[in-house]
Amino acid sequence: MTRTVVIGGGFAGLATAGLLAQDGHRVTLLEQQDILGGRSGRWSAEGFSFDTGPSWYLMPEVIDRWFRLMGSSAAAELDLRTLSPGYRTFFEEHLDEPPTDVVSGHAEELFEQLDPGSSRALRMYLDSGAEVYELAKKYFLYTDFAHPRELMTPQVLKNLPRLGTLLTRSMKGYIDQRFTDPRERQILGYPAVFLGASPSSAPAMYHLMSHLDLTDGVQYPVGGFSALVDAMAELVRAAGVEIVTGATVTGIDVERAPRSVRSQVAAARSRRRSAGSVRGVRYRATSSASNAPRTAADGAETTVPADLVVGATDLHHIQTRLLPERYRAPESRWKRRDPGPSGVLVCLGVRGKLPQLAHHNLLFTADWDDNFARIGTGRELAEETSIYVSMTSATDPATAPEGDENLFILVPAPAVPEWGRGGISTPERHEPGSEQVERVADAAMAQLARWAKIPDLESRVVVRRTYGPGDFVAQFNAWRGSLLGPGHTLGQSAMLRPGVTDPGIRGLFYAGSSVRPGIGVPMCLISSQVVWDAIREDSGVS
């Protein structure tokens, strides 16, 4: 039986562990937090509960596919609700008008209202997005590009010029050529933020994202994404995976290969001094790791033998910290990469109802170029900045006390860990975060109050928790405090993104947002299946 260790208990780690256990691997999953979910965190206080990570349930067929591979289905495991409106938008230059609701399936009518005559362009835009999405699912998402000849199909060859243009042209340029109304441009361009990029740095390929929310719609799993994590964890445990939380991985043991083998991989591994094979994973257990093996005393280092290791956590952390010195990637290699934005997160428990807001809300500033430039260059945010606000209590009353609301605010921010960490304020506890994080949080609350016309918002807040770039480093070992993972820029998408196999260390694989296909819950689930296929191929299993 193959001994396999998965590092990281986020969506990619859970998904990969479950699939490999189904194949007969003896799997141990190590997660340094006390709870599973990785970046999909959770927090609760005074009857309010919050998802502190992903909140848009898109590409439902991808999520359902994983559940079906595990012998179940999303419908059987989750209570899914379709949101209407999908989201509400507030535009800085139109605050004297009612906010604009975006209803899935009715985008053409909306665009015709915003800019008469633009609905035809939108129809063509969405049709193109749907076609590209189907091509991506069939040929580009569920692959590590290990066999390029598999892409030489008539359908791919027919669309090659078009795909080449979409991969080398920016999303902003593609949108601006077709639409002139700033509101329409922002509705179509905002998905770039959830890809860890900006409309000017993301490839036009990702115009397919608008097909997902404007045509397919936005769903919500009752209980939040925590419910999705819990459902996956239950299936993974049932498949036989041993899950150890409170386990901080300190290193991956690699046995150096004989010289004859090293010479065969030298060309592929020129950035490393030699090649080898994984032999185990070392970790330290914390006092809260009640499910750790008895041999894992608090603070003591424990080694789990492994024939295979799947690093389902931050790739930079693995390649520059966890591998033995001779196998580490140089830091200089990472300096050329884009970590994507970080963020300041604000969880607010609010007394009373907030009819001014929908489940999902987007606040767009007029000068988007300045907004993104500040984030990309690490400068201070402007007083008015584009933010996202989730109010799950609009759909799921159990996430707040009766008659109250919960708010989750995401402020995209520079990837600057020096901004620090957030704090907590409840009736029983007051531990403010860093001055910078709290200042950004205060400004976001004030902006929301002004734009949504909730003048007494601050006085109604009874619980508050903030998170900053420093939290993402501390909790997830996130490179430069990245909120989502390396951004989907023109040079970090599709085949230009790191692959799931390590070319010089046998038995080492990677999953999650750092590698192909990329950022987002569906992408992480797909990466687990790409790893699963790679391991099966490596072991001769079809």
Image (tube, helix red, strand yellow):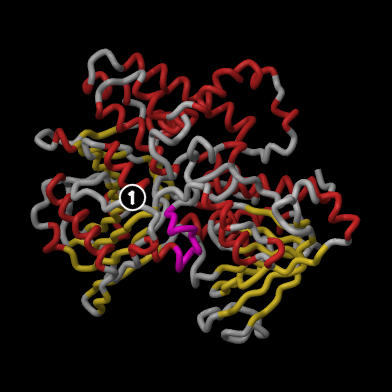
User: Is most of the magenta stretch helix, strand or loop?
Assistant: helix
Q: Quadrant of the N terminus?
A: bottom right
Front-most of residues 204 and 357: 204
- Mark 1: few/some/many CA within 10 Å (<14, 14-19, 20+): many
**Residue 77 to residue 167: above or below:** below
x, y percentage for residue 497?
59, 42
Which residue is most to the front?
332
Name the residue that disc number 1 marks: 412
Question: Mark 1: which amino acid?
Answer: Pro
Residue 473 occupies quadrant: bottom left
Q: Is residue 235 magenta?
A: no
- The span picked out in magenta is 473-483
Q: Is residue 75 visible?
A: no
Query: Is 188 placed above or below 158 here?
Result: below
Instruction: Report if residue 11 is visible in the image.
Output: yes
- Give the left or right position of residue 499, taking residue 395 as reference: right
Instruction: Say which residue appears at 67% left-offset and 65% top-offset.
Output: 323
Picture quadrant where residue 523 is located: top right
Q: Secondary structure at mark 1?
A: strand
Where is 254 relative to 299, above or below? above
Q: Position of residue 101 (x, y in %)?
A: 24, 34
Q: Residue at x 31, y 60 (%)?
A: 399
Residue at x 55% of width, y 52% of height: 334
Instruction: Point out residue 427 in the picture as x, y percentages from the top left corner.
Output: 21, 76
> Where residue 285 sits: x, y (%)?
58, 79
Residue in the picture at 12% in, 33% down: 97
Q: Nearer the viewer, residue 66 or 96?
A: 96
